[in-house]
Image: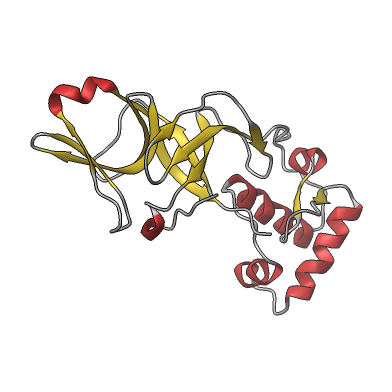
Amino acid sequence: MSTLPPGQHRILVFFAEAQDAGRQPSRAEVAESLGYAFPSAVSKHVEALVRKGMLEAVPEKKRNVRLTDAGWRALGRSPARSGVPVIGAIAAGTPILALEHVTEHLSDIAPQPGRVALRVRGDSMRDAGILDGDFAVIHTANEVQDGQIAAVVVDGDATLKRWKVTADGVELLPENPAYQPIRIPRERLDTVRIVGVLAFVYRVVH
């Protein structure tokens, strides 16, 4: 059980939940969510948590704190040591070769079984809020529901598209009118390998 003062405990829980979801909230966002009148009140709690070793500064990030191992333990959780593995790149545009080895970890996101990330290349999913350079955080799965955004491999090439079931097979739909759907007839569905379903998008703000 946490021995932190209630205000610091609430702040630590908020940052833990944000880190789980891959978000980096500003002090103003924290203040609004937790009912503080001024972001400066949040900053005081954050500074106290940094002094206690529960939060640490991450200089290369604009919104620059994350939980330390001690912070996770204070909440009764195992430390998030490695983060979500990035297993390569995926096209939001023309399909590109899938790279299936760990290239880095997103340390701001707590690892979970079956959760991986792919760096997005291209802008075909722009209108869904998925931009070039983002990380698509994927829950690995063998099946996709109609209408979900999924990471799939077709003939060795990986792409991120909206999965649309049709009478003749499947269409992989872009979210940018400059791109055409990828149509896969029923007889070729066995060439498609589903990597997983999009959970959320992680964007590094510099």
Spot occupied by residue 137 in the image (x, y as percentages of width and height)? 50, 41
Which residue is painted at 30% across and 57% down in the image? Answer: 178
Q: Is residue 115 above or below residue 108?
A: above
199 shown above or below 46: above
Q: Given the current orientation, which residue lies at the most extreme top position?
A: 190
Whole-percent x, y for residue 85 in the image: 60, 32
Q: Visible in this render: residue 96? A: yes
For the residue pair 110 and 153, the one nearer the viewer reads as 153
Would you say 160 lies left or right of 56 here? left
Q: Quadrant of the C terminus?
A: bottom right
In the rendering, at what x and y percent does residue 98 appear? 46, 28
Q: How many numbered marks are there? A: 0
- 41 left or right, relative to 104: right
Question: Which residue occupies 56% across, 48% down?
Answer: 21
> Residue furthest toward the left?
167
Left-right relation of 103 to 50: left
Which of 68/128 is in front? 128
Which residue occupies 73% across, 55% down? 61
Q: Is residue 190 above or below residue 146?
A: above
Here the colouring is: secondary structure
Whether residue 195 is visible = no
Q: Which residue ends up furthest to the bottom in the rendered image?
A: 37
Identity of the residue drawn at 76% across and 62% down: 7
Where does the N terminus fall, quadrant-wise?
Answer: top right
Residue 90 on image: x %, y %: 46, 38
> Could you tell whether 196 is left or right of 28 in the image?
left
Pick the front one: 162 or 133: 133
